[in-house]
Amino acid sequence: MAQSYLHTSSTTAHAEGSRPAVARVLSIAGTDPTGGAGLHADLKSIAAAGGYGMGVVTSLVVQNTRGVQEIHTPDPEFLTAQLRAVSNDVVIDAVKIGMIADAPSTQAVIDWLDELPEQIPVVVDPVMVASSGHALAESISGELLRRATIITPNLIELAQLVQEEQAGTRDEMVAQAQRLAAFTGVQVVAKGGHLSGEDDRDNLLVDATGIRAQAPSPVVHTTAAHGTGCSLSSAIATRLGAGYSAQDAVAWATAWVREALENGEALQVGSGNGPIDHFHRLRRQAEFSDQRPRVFRDVPAPQAVVAPAGPHTERLWSLTGHSLHRFGTEGFIPALVNATLDEEQFRFYIGQDDYYLSVYGSVLARLASLAENPDERRLWVSSALTAIEVEEGMHALWNGDEPTEPSPVTLAYTDFLRAEMGSDYVVAVAAVLPCFWLYAQLAAFVPEKIAEDHPYRPWLETYRDEEFQWACAEVVGVAEKLLDAASDSQRAAAERAFWRACVLEADFFAQATLIDER
């Protein structure tokens, strides 16, 4: 291939097989003035996936959340000039190709791709029809598809590319993806989002021989799905450009898009099919790392599964709203309930919980030594033994006896609990209370019926264990009694300890879905 105008370091970096610190990803696509699709969505997706985004415009599209009104496509020479302006100067680690309106523009892109180093991953999202139904491209060239690393058509586009009726079942979709892969020699991401079956919505990485990998993608009922395909393909390109395998790139991008879909409506952009929330994961990760004591009064506490025992514990419960909101939105619990949690992430959580329990038992034993009331001493000792016995039984199902190194988040929580055992007894009780109370509240997230074949069913059942909830109610009662007899300064210190423990409890669960970010 000719490489006369390429920046020298671009060829060298890829020839050595080095992974860039930040993948530099070029999107070649049309525009969307409202920011939800096309080039605008691509740049957001690239940033969210950890890359540096660049953009070359194929067409200027007049559109909003209600649909496409007009398209202006510049001359192919101008497209070529844009492409060469980038590759003459910048090392390119991956390319994402979206909407190309006509055959001359497609040929311009093909000619430019032929001048790039072959090892640069190229993801082609064959955008042919907008979500509004408006035709965006006259044709998709087979020559362009054969230059891709991965192709990401939706069901409509997949059917058009193989010149067949749209697939109605998962098997039909896979068969069409195999035929496309055989024709192009390229892996295809078959997206089941438009299939009618609730269990057939996964993203499948397919080659000519069949399914190579599967990324869970449960149904998200939303009015904000604009730009989902553009965003998924850009995220895949970015992860490929950073050195990840095709399987890992598709899995990461699928999980990220699902979270963006789940939270798109909150953006309140437009009156039609709104955009997904590209940066929801980044915002929660930033919040995850912020350990400053804060009270979020805009997120009220839900009704408690285990009720407060009086005004003092009522006040404590009012501080749980934000942490419990995180349980329901930050991935681990919803993914666990929906059976979409990655097994590696679950094992990570189990391992961290093993370490936590070893410290938790010693903390409750320390509480027993601090308690003057014999009933309270028995409560702490009994709680330690019961929790450890029950959860160790669950851990044995998944983790065996593998030793676990505690993560920074786990250490922050366990070190906090150890430190609070040196406080007043009432403060120490407030510090361990969230481990009881928030864990008991997880019963509210578990559906009444859990499928027999649910992979995490035994674990989910522990969240609504009645004996644990009775023990939690006893601990809440002890906290109420102690706070009632405490001084104002002790109550203030107990509130701070309780709030901090709530945040750490939420952090502890959330970390499992962030393991691919560390």
Image (spheres, rainbow, N blue to C red):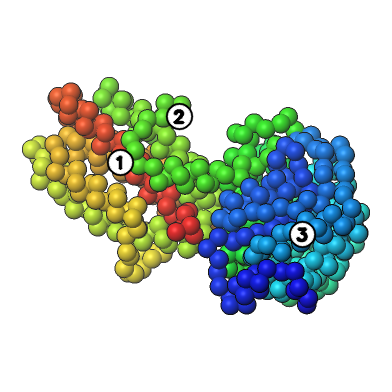
Residue assigned mark 2: 299
Q: Residue furthest left?
A: 372
Q: In this view, does 204 lie above or below 460?
A: below
**In the rendering, at what x and y percent does residue 112 appear?**
80, 66
Q: Which of 116 and 153 is in front in this view?
A: 116
Q: Earlier along the polypeptide chain: callout 2 or callout 1? A: 2
Which quadrant of the view contains residue 237?
bottom right
Instruction: Check residue 434 in the rendering and tell me which mark sits there, or answer none.
Output: none
User: What residue type is disc 2 on?
Assistant: Val
In screen coordinates, is 472 left or right of 155? left
Q: Do the residues labelled 1 and 3 touch (CB within 8 Å)?
A: no
Q: Nearer the viewer, residue 288 or 11?
A: 11
Residue at 78%, 56% in the rendered image:
82
Q: Nearer the viewer, residue 256 or 354?
A: 256
Q: Give the CA separation, mark 3 to mark 2.
A: 47 Å
Which quadrant of the view contains residue 465?
top left
Residue assigned mark 3: 83
> In the structure shown, which secondary structural element does the residue marked by tag 3 occupy?
helix
Q: Earlier along the polypeptide chain: callout 3 or callout 2? A: 3
User: What residue type is disc 3 on?
Assistant: Leu
User: Of tags 1 and 3, which is closer to the observer?
Assistant: 3
Residue assigned mark 1: 501
User: What residue type is disc 1 on?
Assistant: Ala
Residue at 45%, 29% in the rendered image:
299
**In the rendering, at what x and y percent does residue 416 appear?**
24, 46
Q: Earlier along the polypeptide chain: callout 1 or callout 3? A: 3
